[in-house]
Image (cartoon, rainbow, N blue to C red):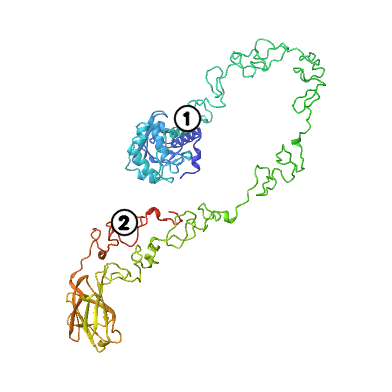
Amino acid sequence: MKDEHRRRLKFDWLVFMMLGLVAIAAMGCSSSDNDSSAVLKGKFLDSAVEGIEYSTDSQSGLTDPDGTFNYEEGETVTFSIGGITVGQAAGQSVITPVDLSQGSENDPRTINISRFLLTLDDDNNPDNGIDITADVRKAAENLTVNFDLSLSEFESDPAVVQAIASLTALTASGQRTLVSAETAQTHLRNTLAGIDNDSDNYTETQGDCDDSSADSHPGAEDICGDGIDQDCSGSDLACPGTSDADDDGDTYSETAGDCDDANAAIYPEAEDICDDGIDQDCDGSDAVCPPIVEDVDDDGDTFTETAGDCDDSNAAIYPGAEEVCGDSIDQNCDGSDAVCPPKPEDVDDDSDTFTETAGDCDDTNAAVYPGAEDVCGDSVDQNCDGSDAICPPKPEDVDDDGDTFTETAGDCDDTNSAIYPGAEDSCGDAIDQNCDGSDALCPEDMDDDGDGLTENQGDCDDTNALAYAGATEICGDNADQDCDGSDVICMNEENVVTLSNGFQIAFTDVVYSPDGTSVWQYRVQKSPEAAELTEWALELPDCVTILGTSPLRMDTINLNSLRWEGSPDFESGDFVVTLDGLWASGNVIAAANGIKGQIPGPGCEEAVFDDNDGDGYTWITGDCDDANADSYPGAEEICGDEVDQDCDGSDTICPEDIDDDADGFT
C-alpha cells in the first residue's frame, strides 16, 4: 500500500495550486455557467494519511497514498475510520490534526488525534506515511472514540483501549498500545515544519523564518531598514550610510563598535599592529611595540641572546655551560641535550635482543626473554610473564564427569557423575557409588543374627540365630524355626490315630494363608504288619470344600470323605489337604478296614487370629508387622524411613531422592 508516493511529503504547493487553477480555468471553458462548483483537491497530513474516509456535501471516498481528498469551495470535510469520527475542518489545500481540533499543535485533542492515527499505521512506521487498511476500517464500523479528553484520560478510556487493541491486531505489525503523547507531538511538529504554508517553495525545515509570508525565505531580497528579515539571515538588512550598516563587510557596523567602517581590517578585536599609527582593534589607541632585548643579559650569566644565550631567563644556560645528560635541557646551547651513556639495565648482556629495561627477567640466559617459549613445569619463567607455565593435567587428573573428583582424587568411575568418594551408596544395586570398595548392603541382605542367612536368603527372623531356612523345628513352641511359615505341632497322642496292625495317621500342622485357604498337613506311618492294608479314609466335615491334595490320588466317599488306595505312588510319608477356608481346628475321623479313630482336622468354625498391635489387622489380613500399630494395609506411608507402613512390600522413595532428569543427582 505504501509506495514511492510516500516520499513526496514535502511537495511544491505553488505548483499544486497552479495546476488547480488550470483545472478550474479548463472547467470555466464550458458553454454553461450553471456548474459553478469546481472540485478541488486537498491533502490530509500527519505524514501523508492514506486510507482514511472523507466526506463533504458533494464528495466522499478514501485518501490516496499522498493523503489526497476532494472537496468543493466552502465545504466542510469530515474524516473518519469506520464508525470513528476523527474530526472535521473547512476544505483547504492542507488539513492536519491541528485543523481538525480547531486549536493548536499543543491542544490535547490535536495530540489525541495524532496518537490514534500513528498507532493504527499498518507497518508502524509513520515516517513513510500512515496507512489505514480496509480490515481496520471494517473492524471499526461499530466503534466510537472521544478525542475531547485530556491526554491521561484518553489513553485510559476503555473505548480507546478496546479500539487500539482490536484494530492494531489487524495490522501487518501486530497488536500494540497507544503511542506516547511525546512521540505524536514530535512527529506532528516535523510534519508541520515540512509544509510550505505560504507557497514560496520553502518550509520551516528548509529555513523559512516566516512561513506565513511568501516574501520571507532563504535567498529572498532583504529590504533594508524595514524591520523584516526577508532573507532569513537572522536580522533585517541595515541601509547603507547608517550607523547600523556594515559598510566595509567586516561584519561590524559603527553601532557595533567599528571605528573605521570604510576599512575591513579595522574592527573590534582585530589584531593591532604596533607603532603603525593605526588603531586596528578599535580600543582607542595604537599598540606600542615592546623594546628590543637581545643585547640585555637578563639572567646575569654574562651572556646575552645576541651572544648565543639560548635561554636568557636561566643563569645555568649559556654557551660552554656544563651539559646535564638526559634532562631534555640544552644547558650549553649547542642545539641539543647530551645523550647519557646506557645504564647496565639497558645493556643486552645475553644477546637475546632484550634488556632488563625491555623486560628481560634473566639477562644472563639467552633462552629467557619476553615472548620466549615457556617450558612447563621446569620452575623457569622463560617468557618473563611472572610464573612458570603449568603443564596440562594428566588424564587421571581430569574430572571427566563433572562431579569435582578425579581418578587421582579417588573417583572410582570418572564417567559417572553419581559415583565419587562420599557419594550416597545405594544398597544392593551392585554399584559402588561412594568408592569405598564395595556396594552397600541393604538391611535385608545383612545377617543380623549371625546364623549365616539373611532375610533375602529366607531367614524369617533375622534377630534369632535359631530361626532360618532348614533349621530344626521345635514342635509346639509357637516359633517357626525352619521358616516354613508355621510351628510344627508336636506328635502327641491326641494327634495320632492307629488304624490297624500298627498303621498310623498323624496330624502334624495347619498353615493359614492370607488368600483365605488353609493347608492341613498329615503324616502316614506304615508298619510291616500293615502290609496287607488296601485302603484307608479321612472323613472331613460337610462344611469344608477340598481344593486339592498332595501327593495322593483322591476319591470322594459320601460327601467330603477322602479315600486313599494303596499304590506304588504312596504308601507312607507326608501328605496335605488344601481347603477353601480358614477353619479352626476340630476332630475328624480316620478309618481303615472298619477301624476308626479321631484325629485333629478342620472344624466348621473360622479360626480366630490375634491382632497383636491393635491396629485392626492380623497377619492373615495382611499386617506385615503385627508388632507395630503403624504398619497395616492402607496405612499412610512415610517416605525414606526404611519402614513399610502400608504393607505394599517396600518403603516409598521421597521425591527429593528421585533422579527426575537422569543426570545422576537428586
383 sits left or right of 440 in the view: right
Q: Amino acid at mark 1?
A: Asn
Q: Is residue 155 left or right of residue 215?
A: left
Secondary structure beneath label 1: loop
Above-or-below relation of 655 to 486: above
Q: Which residue of the protein is positioned furthest toward the bottom in this rendering?
A: 532
Q: Report crowding for label 2: few under 14, some 14 to 19, many 20 or more residues within 10 A (C-alpha).
A: many
> In what element is the residue under mark 2?
loop
Q: Is residue 295 left or right of residue 20?
A: right
Location of residue 455 (image quadrant): bottom left
| Gap between marks 2 and 1 measured at Cα | 87 Å
Residues at badges 2 and 1 in contact (C-beta under 8 Å)? no
428 lies left or right of 636: right
Q: Is residue 94 visible?
A: no
User: Does 95 appear above or below 421?
Assistant: above
First in sequence, mark 2 or 1: give its number. 1
Tell me the residue at 22%/78% (across/down): 496
Q: Which mark is residue 149?
A: none
On the image, which quarter does residue 635 sit in?
bottom left
Position of residue 582 measured from the top left corner of the image (x, y, whole percent): 22, 70
Who's the residue at 49% across and 37% down the image? Answer: 9
Viewer-side residue, 367 vs 618:
618
What label sits on residue 637 in the rendered view?
2
Disc count in the image?
A: 2
Question: Circle 1 is placed at which residue position?
Answer: 197
Residue 37 position in % (x across, y down): 39, 35
Question: x, y (%) of residue 601?
Answer: 21, 75
Q: Quadrant of residue 587?
A: bottom left
Confirm whether residue 225 shows in the render.
Answer: yes
Quadrant location of the N terminus in the rendered image: top left
